[in-house]
Amino acid sequence: MKPSGRPNGRLGVVITGGTIGMHGGDDGLAPASGLAMRLREALCAQGRHDVGPFVELAPLIDSANAEPEFWVRIAAAVVSLVEDDDCSGVLILHGTDTMAYTAAGLAFLLFGLPVPVVLTGAMHPIGDVGSDGWDNLSGALDLLTSGPPAGTTVYFAGRQIPAVHCSKWRTQTADAFTRTLRPTMDRSAPALPPWSYRELVAPARVAVLPLHPGFEPTALAALAAAGVPGCVLECYGSGTAPVADPRFIAALELARSRNMVVVAISQCPEGAVAFGHYATDHRLKTAGVVSGGGMTREVALAKLGILLGAGLPPAACRDWMRVSVFGEL
Ligand code: ASP
């Protein structure tokens, strides 16, 4: 195993798009190539010779277009920088809109990678006067050279946030990300996960459904009937749902009969699902719904997609959703 974050080790950079490298056009800000060259020159001028190689994914995207397949492309670039170019850490420049989802996806996809990976970006293009891009970039590089443990972290506006506890929280200020306040339940996985960075998994496409008064159970039934293999159900409070509606229970039964894995998380920004507190959540459990504890939407979506993409049968996916790989519960 390589030591992580070696001082003097080379830091690879993967550029994926996002505001940090955007230019203004007729329709508004859009990704533009050339950031790698600008960064290389600027960093050299600052005497930073430890950064590179730079990999610019093509096409560069607004992260609103980052799908789970894109996580795999980023992960493959990271693995190649580590294994082929011997980088001791990797920086990923990414748009902020879906950075927390990509970070969660990479945390799971890159399980076992022996070096640190840090994601950052900016709320304003790095070419604009007063952009937060330079501070985020240099702070993220400093973090990588400080020898952090292996694993995936978001660095933004001076804060380091573990990938599995990160959400985009603000749209108008530079401190766009928060560390989610969710209690962790220490039910650690009893074994190593059945996937790793050595063989990247193609995540399965899964759905997220937020409950709300007037929730239409046909939405859940339609997903199950269409063969969608997993669904993150954003429940109320500590895990309640409209179980008095027989159509809702019928939709859950259909989901179970179609082998869809349904995971309950809380739609409250703080707290966790704790089945067994109310009779309503007991009914969810008996209908086959798994508690996702304190997982955020980003983490539950990424983990469920990767478990299903790894080919685990539904029962094994449910077991893995109940235990913690990185403290994500
Ligand atoms: N729409 C941009 C993106 O996520 C926003 C940003 O980077 O801040 O790619």
Image (cartoon, rainbow, N blue to C red):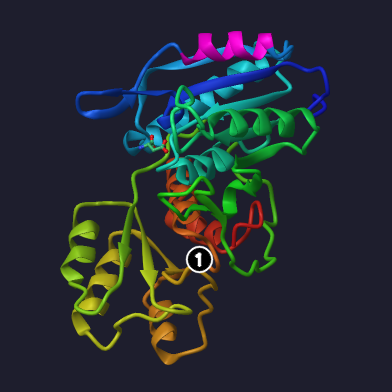
Secondary structure mostly seen in magenta is helix
- Number of residues whose C-alpha sits closer than 10 Å to that of mark 1, classed few (under 14), some (14–19) or many (20 or more): many
- Which quadrant of the figure contains the N terminus? top right
Between 223 and 300, the one lying in front of the other is 300
Residue at point 64%, 12% (across, down) = 52
201 in relation to 158, above or below: above
Expressed as whole percent of the image width and height from the top left, the position of residue 28 reads 25, 30
11 in relation to 116, above or below: above
In this figure, which residue is indicated by the disc labeled 1?
292
Left or right of residue 246, residue 188 in this image: right
Expressed as whole percent of the image width and height from the top left, the position of residue 285 reads 43, 78
Magenta-colored span: 35-45
Asked if residue 198 shows in the view, the reply is no
Residue 39 belongs to the span the image colors magenta: yes
Residue at point 24%, 52% (across, down) = 227
Residue at point 24%, 79% (across, down) = 213
Expressed as whole percent of the image width and height from the top left, the position of residue 118 reads 62, 34
* Disc 1 residue lies near ligand 1 with CB under 8 A: no
Mark 1 element type: loop
Left or right of residue 255, residue 162 in this image: right
Between 97 and 67, the one lying in front of the other is 97
Left or right of residue 158, residue 64 in this image: left
- Which amino acid type is marked by label 1? Gly
